[in-house]
């Protein structure tokens, strides 16, 4: 019922698989040979320490400690990648990581932004590649929630209910 089917979904599946991700009939992802072949060795201790020093300089001691403890970014190669971004990109990704975003999702949101000229297919492909059962993104002046899988209807109902609630005015 919630599986990936139809020509459009087949195209999403093929695009995900072209990046080294295999998508099972139920929409679950598993690493493929291409993904395994592209795995690099972890960065050296010196490279990791240099990355952490830059993160501390740009985002402060608290953020540095959280990254060092692997609370905000789990993989050493992602820590090094994060440290090589521009100051502005790091400052924009930092708050997303604090809110629980994965590094990959935050990086895509900030650095590889979809534009209003991209097709919906690109949004769906990104959603599938990020895993999980839902994906939140902004494209231009629009916010998008992409939900898929067996629980899609239940999740969409919760989103609709949340959005339908009247907001409580904040005292000024």
Image (spheres, rainbow, N blue to C red):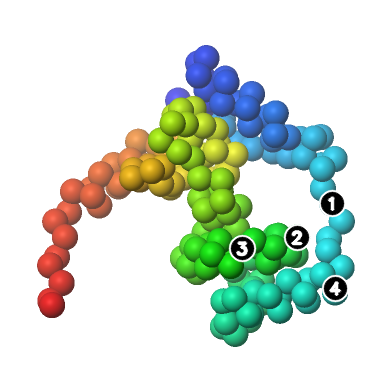
Q: What element carries label 4?
A: helix
Tell me: 88 left or right of 69: left
Query: Outermost residue, bottom direction?
Result: 61
Closer to the camera, 83 or 64? 83
Q: What element carries label 1?
A: loop
Mark 1 and mark 2 residues within 8 Å of each other at the beta carbon: yes
Mark 4 and mark 1 residues within 8 Å of each other at the beta carbon: no
Q: Please tell me which of labels 1 and 2 falls first in the chain.
A: 1
Q: Which mark is residue 86?
A: 3
Is residue 7 depicted above or below 107 in this figure?
above
Is residue 132 depicted above or below 98 in this figure?
above
Mark 3 and mark 4 residues within 8 Å of each other at the beta carbon: no
Residue at image coords 35%, 36%? 153
Closer to the camera, 32 or 153? 32
Q: Please tell me which of labels 4 and 1 falls first in the chain.
A: 1
Query: Disc 3 versus disc 4: distance between alpha carbons?
Result: 22 Å
Is residue 68 depicted above or below 8 in this figure?
below
Q: Name the residue under label 2.
A: 77
Location of the N terminus by quadrant is top left
Q: Where is residue 48 in the image (x, y as percent from the top left)?
A: 78, 71
Residue at image coords 63%, 27%? 15
Q: Name the residue under label 1.
A: 40
Q: Please tell me which of labels 1 and 3 falls first in the chain.
A: 1
């Amino acid at each position: 019922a919630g599986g990936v089917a139809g020509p459009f979904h087949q195209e999403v599946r093929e695009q995900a698989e072209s990046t080294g991700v295999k998508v099972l009939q139920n929409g679950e992802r598993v690493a493929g040979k291409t993904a395994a072949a592209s795995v690099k060795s972890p960065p050296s201790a010196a490279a990791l320490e240099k990355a952490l020093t830059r993160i501390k300089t740009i985002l402060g001691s608290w953020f540095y400690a959280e990254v060092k403890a692997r609370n905000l970014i789990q993989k050493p190669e992602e820590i090094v990648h994060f440290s090589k971004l521009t100051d502005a990109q790091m400052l924009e990704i930092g708050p997303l990581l604090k809110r629980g975003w994965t590094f990959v999702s935050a990086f895509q949101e900030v650095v590889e932004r979809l534009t209003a000229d991209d097709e919906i297919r690109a949004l769906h492909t990104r959603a599938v590649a990020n895993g999980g059962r839902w994906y939140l993104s902004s494209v231009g002046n629009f916010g998008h929630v992409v939900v898929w899988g067996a629980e899609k209807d239940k999740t969409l109902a919760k989103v609709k209910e949340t959005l339908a609630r009247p907001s409580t005015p904040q005292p000024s």
